[in-house]
Amino acid sequence: MSALGTSTKELLSPALWLRYLSTLICFPSVDFKDDCQPSPSHNATFGWDSRSNLSALFLHAENTSYYTSREINSLAQGMACAQNVAIITKIIDLFVYRSASSYSFNLLPAITNFNYNLAASDVMADYLINASNSNETWHLIFNGNVCYSLGYACTLNYYLQGMTGLWYTDIRLEQFKTINSTIYTNLKALDIDDISIRDALYYFNSYYNNILLPANYRGQITYADMTRWLYDNYVPIGATPWLVQLNHTFTPVQYNLTVRPYFPSSYNYGIGKNFTFDANVTIGAVKFGATQTISFNSHRHMINHLRVFKTNDSNEVPWNSIIRDYDNAIVTINLAQPIQAGTSILIVVNYTGLIDNNPGEGTYMNWDYLDFNKQKSWIFATDFEGGPSTRSLAPCYDEPHYKASWYVTVQYPTDMVALSNALEERTRNLGNGLSETTFKPTPKMASYLLAISVGDFAALRGRTNNNMLVRVWTWTGMQNNGELSLRAAIDTINYLSSTLNKSLPLEKLDVLALPQYSGRSNGAMENWGLIISGYLSCLWNPDYSTTAQLTDTYWTISHETTHQWFGDLVTLDWWNYIFLNEGFATYWPTVVMSVTYPDQADWAHYSRFNDAERSLRSDANLQSTRPIVVPASQLAGYCVFCYQSYEKASSLIHMIEQTIHRKNFDLALHNYLNVYEYSTAVDTDLFEKFTETAMNDYPNVYDWNGYPLNVTNYVRPFFYLQTFPLIKVVSSPDGLSYTYQQAPYIQNGLPNNTVFLWNIPLWTEPVQDYLPWLISQKSLNNDFLSGWNIVNPRRKVYARVWYDDPTWAPIQNQIQSNLTAFDPITRASFIADTHALVNQQLVPWSRLLNLIKYAANVPELPTWGIVNSIFDDLLIKFKFQTADYSKLKTFILQLLNANSQLQLLFNHTGNWASDLTSVFITELSCYLGQSNCLSQASTSFNQFISSCQNSAYGTGRCNQVTPDHRPFQLCYGLRQNPNAASAVFNLVQWYINNAPLVDYWRNDAVALLGSLSCLNDDNQVAQYLNLTLYDQLPQEFFQYVAETDSSGNRLFNFFNNNLQKIVDSRHFNIIVSNLALGWSTSTQNTMLQNFSWQGVRITNEQANAWANTVNGVVSNINCVPSLRILVKIVDNFPKRLKACIDARGGHFE
Ligand SMILES: [Zn+2]
């Protein structure tokens, strides 16, 4: 529940909420002539007839002596709930006239009961003005019977109290001033004596202050708190994306926004303002249709003041009412008269907003982080593409196609730095510790790209070839870690500006690193001109960061910089076209890296292959497969920011580029950016640009009918369908020919009423002299050539390939005899596709394991990336299956013992692909006890201890081994040299006591802590577990013990021996969820099932955690029979395949 209906002439949220609360007190009801119903106890007291008239009863009660004043008061309170204008007027008459002549019950205070009735306050205002038109009525109100001197409370005093009880806003202040001056004019006209007028003004002035005070203090202190609670509890906090669109009657042209955020800093402000902001926005908009209403977005705002002006003559446009739709964050103004088409207007809104007190989407704080002096600090920041969105910072047209220019001014603590999308224009000191920076106007842009941040920042600076300023901002002390990001941003701008022949309309691009971005330490947002990122995605520390973090940092900043064109210059028209942003931002970084780091081309190729692989895995599963583009009507609950918008779209963009060639592709994008800049686009706008250029440069591309290729028709199934094609290469029974066939990869559960057919370009090797297409389920027969024939080399098409036995056999033979016939990506895609098809039970494990053997001969990343993930999975599943585990271990060790792999152990060359391969190989080798790996770990560990054990500056520089390999060096080194445990423990303590390093460059701290779990001595590890239980070591230690323990019993025994203490601790859940990691034997199952709780009582939540662990082991046990099959590398391949086909009812031809 959240929308509280409409209000008239009342914009302030707290008052609205109060009115809502007052209905809880009043129980308004249509059943009663006076609108109100006293509480049930009064029913009993008065023998209440539900049809009786409350006023009559009141008079009766007052005229007799049967009732106590408390009961009469209750009736008066009930009457003051009336909502109907005529009835309110009647009650005012009653109170005013009766009090003026009353000698029985004192009615003066009764009129104050209206102070919870917003409707009555307006009626009372009108009533008061009317009263001032006649001597007689005015004296009734002003004098009453007892109002002889100003020291005395008179009717007017109570009257104003009742009238203004809910008036807190600037609008009410102005209304009050107007009433005051109208009455003054009226009274002058009546010739009332000056003393009486002066006395009346005295009351008005005192009530003016009563309104001013709440407006300035109470309204923003108490009610900001209260409004926050009510919004948090009764209104959806943002939506990703917001789905209800605005009435398309006005279009914004320009915003002037001034924001003053309040958060702990050197600037002193009233405590009630904490984590709120005061702001003013002027929206310049043009009307283009017939309407008498204006709608815009506003979310979590207390609007103090709203006025509309015509731009040409500055005349104010009066309005009748404001409607707030809280659920969809839309404000609608009903104007008093229509405005003509083409009229420019200004909407001025003065308001207070709420800052979320932790990092997330919307307007938020990075709080409680540690600055370089180890002091806790705060940073104000925004993140608007999802969640509460820009409408939580400023009333605006918060949809991508309403592009406008933003003029931003920020007021902030003088010792801090304020950043926004555009370059600073001027800064001035406002005094009292406050400064103000005005930024230059942004280009015309979508509202979700607006960004503001305030904090204690420092920057690195650089310039692009076109002299654009690029700055990397961090919280002070971290800026030296921003060099890689600076390079990534500059490289990307230089490369894309020239490749796409399109410069950015920006004077500067900032990258801002935050301790937490959106609640995480990684991830980033491409605000135009001000990229905001979690520090792990944009800062890189050579002493502690790994190669994986290096490539991730460069990639992330290149991704966000790419968005400055794709997303910011040209924007998706609506959220179902998000791939227009994310697909390109995922596609381009690897291209940029392969050009700017030509030596790292292997990594770039792997990265593209890996993106496709990640996407194919999600797209292979009925629960996770998604089309890239869905109708807007299906967006509710749809994950727009999921793999399909990123890796899937990027893979398809790559496929288009491969199809129409790079030169045509780049020209198409140049045209696309030129046509849709400062505007928005949909999918077909892009595809049409590709179609226009597809024939531009040789070699020309023709479609399946021999016509020039229409890219829209070509790619539509790839973008609009779930899953992806499985290309099948199937030989004829006589073995003389074969056919290409296609089928959706997901075999069961797809919608029946949809045709799953793709237009597949059939790249093959050996290469053919034209590009054939597979557009139906089955192609024409091809003659069987001697030797192998492969389809989709280097995985250009977004698909997997299945070969039947006769077509696969020559490929396997070629791999065994000379694998260099195939390039590294093609080789890796053989393994990836075969592994996927094994899990689909379409090929046997034997084919996969025979194929994997070639990995021994190639120390290359694509192959080992895939192989490593397969082995990781199997080693966990087989961990406690003793006999089978040793066979699996032997098999993997054979691959690792090859010369090419031995050279990679603990090897670091600066070639990213090679270094990442080395990480996979070193980890697997040491884990499986490979002797070279263990001896290198031991030697380098002893060196580490002697040079680092007394270090007072962390372990980043004294260690000869690079950060990539330190986890293995420390774990397997300490295991072989247990005497060094106390030295390692001291270093762990050093990191705990030097918090900034632990918090921000954790790799060494984590590796050192993890190594303590590698010790062979159970008792020693149990001591560390004990320290963890008492919070002397980080909680993650429990998990490390479970991961490194070969017996599998350590955590379980610790649990058993310390049951009561663990049950009473905060660590119960993490221990229980890890204590049976990988358990899969019946003995282990029995240990859990028969576990004795020794009389210790546990909570329901704890019982659930235990049940989850038990169930996990049961499901592992059920998995074992199928794993057994794996180790029997059977060679009855055709028979097994046939069984597989039969089991699928002949579906698989
Ligand atoms: Zn992105």
Image (cartoon, rainbow, N blue to C red):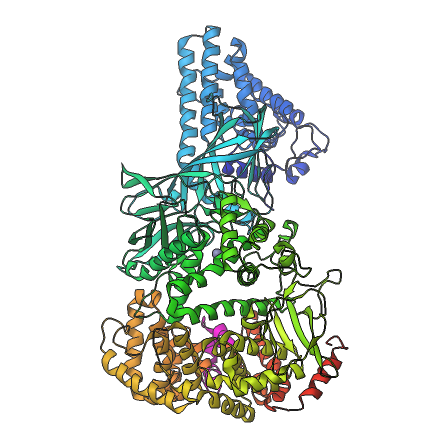
- Residue 950 falls within the magenta-colored stretch: no
Residue that sits furthest to the top in the current view: 191
**Relative to 950, residue 1015 above or below:** below
- Residue 1047 falls within the magenta-colored stretch: yes
Can you give x and y, in whole percent of width and height, for residue 377 in the image? Answer: 32, 54
**Relative to 264, residue 865 above or below:** below
Q: Nearer the viewer, residue 429 or 1112?
A: 429
* Left or right of 161 on screen, residue 801: right
Q: Nearer the viewer, residue 708 or 41?
A: 708
Can you give x and y, in whole percent of width and height, for residue 273 in the image? Answer: 39, 43
Quarter residue 976 falls in: bottom left
Please tell me whether the stretch drawn in magenta is mainly helix, strand or loop.
helix
Q: Look at 49% across and 60% down and name the residue there.
A: 586
Residue 1029 visible from this viewpoint: no
Question: If the image is split into quadrants, where does the C terminus sit?
Answer: bottom right
Q: Nearer the viewer, residue 1127 or 85?
A: 1127
Residue that sits furthest to the bottom in the current view: 883
Q: Look at 47% across and 89% down and name the residue there.
A: 893
Can you give x and y, in whole percent of width and height, for residue 44 in the image? Answer: 68, 38
Residue 600 visible from this viewpoint: yes
**Relative to 705, residue 1016 above or below:** below
How many numbered marks appear?
A: 0
* Left or right of 689 on screen, residue 169: left
Quarter residue 56 falls in: top right
Which residues are drawn in magenta? Answer: 1045-1073
